[in-house]
Image (cartoon, grey):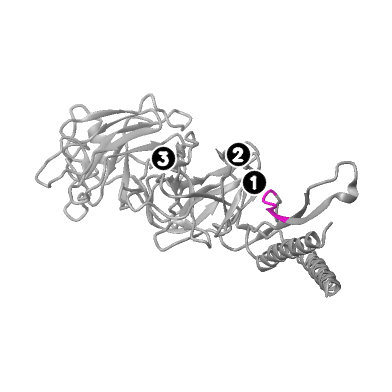
Amino acid sequence: MSINSALASGVSGLSANESAVTAISNNIANSNTVGFKTTETAFETFVTGGGGANPAQNSGGGVAAVAKALVSQQGQMNQTSNNTDMAISGNGFFVVQSKLSSTSASSSVANTNPTLFTRAGSFTANASGYLVNTAGDYLLGWPANADGVIVTTNTSVTGLSPINVSANQGSVAPTTLVGINANINAATTESAAAIAAGTTPVGGGAYNPATNSMAAYNAATGTGVKPDFTITVPVSDSLGGQHDLQIDLLKSSTPNQWYTEIVDPTTTDVAGVSNGQIAYGKLAFTNQGAYDPTNSSLTLGGSTATPISGTSPISLTIGASPASSATVPTSVSWASSLGVAAQTIQFGLTNITQEASSSAVQQLTTNGTSFGNLSSVTVDSSGVLTANYDNGVSRNIAQAALATFSDPDGLQAVSGNAYQQTLQSGNYSILQAGNGGAGKIDPSTLEASTVDLSSEFSSLIITQRAYSACSKVITTADQMVQQLLDVVR
């Protein structure tokens, strides 16, 4: 090895160890960076020329440093208080976009926008409601449709959308189901109006759902027939408006049968009917006091009266609000002033009994809710984000997508603690959490940096010593050159 080779080896050693110190310094600086992966520096030798079988003639060419991020290394999981923080227990990466398309902010991912992959799951909603991490990258996933159903069959990046958790700041749920657990007193004495309705010919003041109904009852004016028992049912419409409907019951002179009307007591919330009478008919019971659907029947109000099967649950449809109050619907509808959609409500009556004890409602359940504001967003282990509203309604928003690579250590690091696909990493596969080795998502958790400070400081000392040794090689070679020059003199 010539003196020049010795100088070159020393210089390459300085350069290689400078690179190693740079990598160590970057590791130490990112010891608290969420999802950061340690960069390891490996050294490889250079040998220039050779003397065949005589190793003494080999000329050392020095050393080169090769930095490689240990991307596949799993970091420690740390719990947080943020519901939208996410960590991945497995080999997957969050799919993110560095910026949104100016033309389609939420519908799709534009091909011109860079798609990146990261393990940094510190996501929070920005001013527009999009989930972004600390680098400002937008989390991508499969959006839910209007019914909260998430379709994940499209496994290309262009099938994903930036996830917005505040697109629907409020939520309502119209009432579709009513469950009634009640008893109607079998010992109730028939009223004069009920007795008159059961005589032939019909007596004066007899109950009649069209001309002398419970819906028309007014104690002050003496009109209508007073019901023996009333069940009040709260109902939410399609806009979250609240209405109280009544089930009015009048004991018939026919054993085990009750005249029944479903009524809007305000008379102004419905249109197309008189006195707010939505439906009328009878409810029947067996001689054991159980609900008897075979002998029960109701008719929907309006000029085109529509029979309703007595089989529980009874389906009651209230039509959409007419566009104008001047329009008189032919069947019962919501009032035009409400501006709400049509609504079908199923009344479950199988838990109504007729026994010789006081009439009472033990339990009444409905599934409708009034307008609710967004109160929180939660994430499950499959990456499904759910919006929770203060009216008790929960609705799926989207599902975060994960990407896997055949060689994740081959990914190229970019700013923002993210990575780009390379030839070495192989193509990505878009998966749901829990599938194909992507791993599951831990909500309210962040993956810590994989940097081991004690190891890094030890490496820093070793690298500094190696750097000093290389500088000593250069100094020694310089002295040898100087001695050679002195010989010439």
Residue at disc 2, secondary structure:
loop
Q: What residue type is labelled 2?
A: Gly
Please give the range of residues in magenta.
65-72
- In the picture provided, is 247 more to the left or to the right than 337? right
Quadrant assignment for the C terminus:
bottom right
Residue underneath mark 1: 410
Residue underneath mark 3: 187
Asked if marks 2 and 1 touch (Cβ < 8 Å), the reply is yes
Asked if marks 1 and 3 touch (Cβ < 8 Å), the reply is no
Residue underneath mark 2: 426
Asked if marks 2 and 3 touch (Cβ < 8 Å), the reply is no
The answer, for residue 191, to whether it is visible in the render is yes
Q: What residue type is labelled 1?
A: Gly
Quadrant assignment for the N terminus:
bottom right
> What percent of the width, then of the height, locates residue 307?
26, 28
Q: Extreme left residue here?
A: 326
